Amino acid sequence: MSVLKPWDPAPDVVFLHKKKSRKPKDLITVCVTNYNYAKVVEECLDSIAAQTHQAIELIVVDDLSTKDDSVDVISGWMEENRDRFYRTLLLVNPRNQGPSFSRNCAFDHASAEAVFIMDADNLIYPTALEKTYAALINGKFPAVYTQIEEFGNRQGIGKADIWDPERMRESNYVDVMALIRKEAWEKVGGFSHIEEGWEDYDFWLKFIDHGLTPGYLPEILCRYRVHHSSRTATEALAAHYDLELVMEFRHPSPETATK
């Protein structure tokens, strides 16, 4: 099942390599979304290649980067590292579609049932996939998220904590870097495009709407790059009040819904 519409533009396949061996039972698809991150994307991909979990399918969706040579950098890296992965795929959107579309596109092409999603400017520690996969399977969760470490223009620890629907309705404390079952992504309808941002928050609020409870793994396994040019630091921050109203409209609290 796909959440993409029949009229959505199909991405161009720039790089594809697949091993002839049978698909591993513990395969994880790592979906990376990229937009003009040529300077840091290799660092992101290196962190994926260094994972202790061996069965990985790597899918990168470039959202039509025009300010740098992202596509050449990524395709070159994939050629050099293709033997590390069960399958390696680079897709390029024919026009800029935004992060939600790119993430949905990556999920749609994923052949694993467990999908880890991250942006090309972020990193994961070597045991991130191994530990989140164990938690996902053993805990039978629809998704598993971890604590994050901030680096770049700000250093510190994230605000991740045990899943609490009431607290989540007040503000988002869960990053999008998480291991998600593909069936859970399908159930909530994937990511939705939200002007000025907060697609990640909207995605997690959909879990509440559908009665899904993700698991929290209280270890620092993901690294979130803080920089002043990110969409979060520009559009979303400026539109904070409007976005709060959008979230309340899209995901009314039980008290509001009964009025």
Image (spheres, helix red, strand yellow):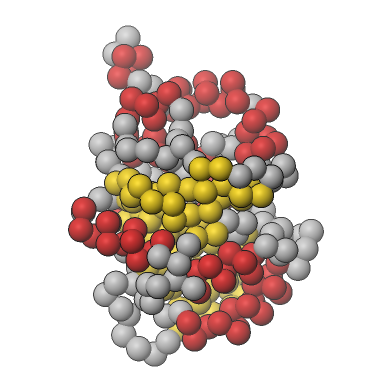
- The answer to whether 229 is drawn above or below residue 61 in the figure is above
| Whether residue 101 is visible | no
Residue 220 visible, this angle:
yes
In the image, is 126 to the left or to the right of 233? Answer: left
Q: Quadrant of residue 40?
A: bottom right
Which quadrant would the C terminus be assigned to in this image? Answer: top left
Question: Residue 100's spot in the image, x, y percent?
Answer: 53, 48
**Is residue 218 left or right of 177 when viewed as pictured?**
left
Residue at 21%, 53% in the rendered image: 139
Residue depicted at x 25% and y 36%: 211
| 66 in relation to 202, above or below | below
Q: Is residue 153 above or below residue 94?
A: above
- 150 and 214: which is toward the camera: 150
Q: Position of residue 215 (x, y in %)?
A: 29, 46
Give the quadrant of residue 234.
top right
Q: Residue furthest front?
A: 156
In the visual, does 259 lie left or right of 139?
Answer: right
Marker count (numbered): 0
Q: Is 245 in front, or is 4?
A: 245
Image coordinates of residue 138 in percent, x first then y, are 20, 58
The residue sitting at the bottom extreme is 20
Residue drawn 51% across the image and 43% down it: 157
Residue lying at the far top of the rendered structure: 259
Q: Quadrant of residue 1?
A: bottom left
Residue 245, position as x, y percentages in the image = 52, 21
Which residue: 32% across, 80% down? 23
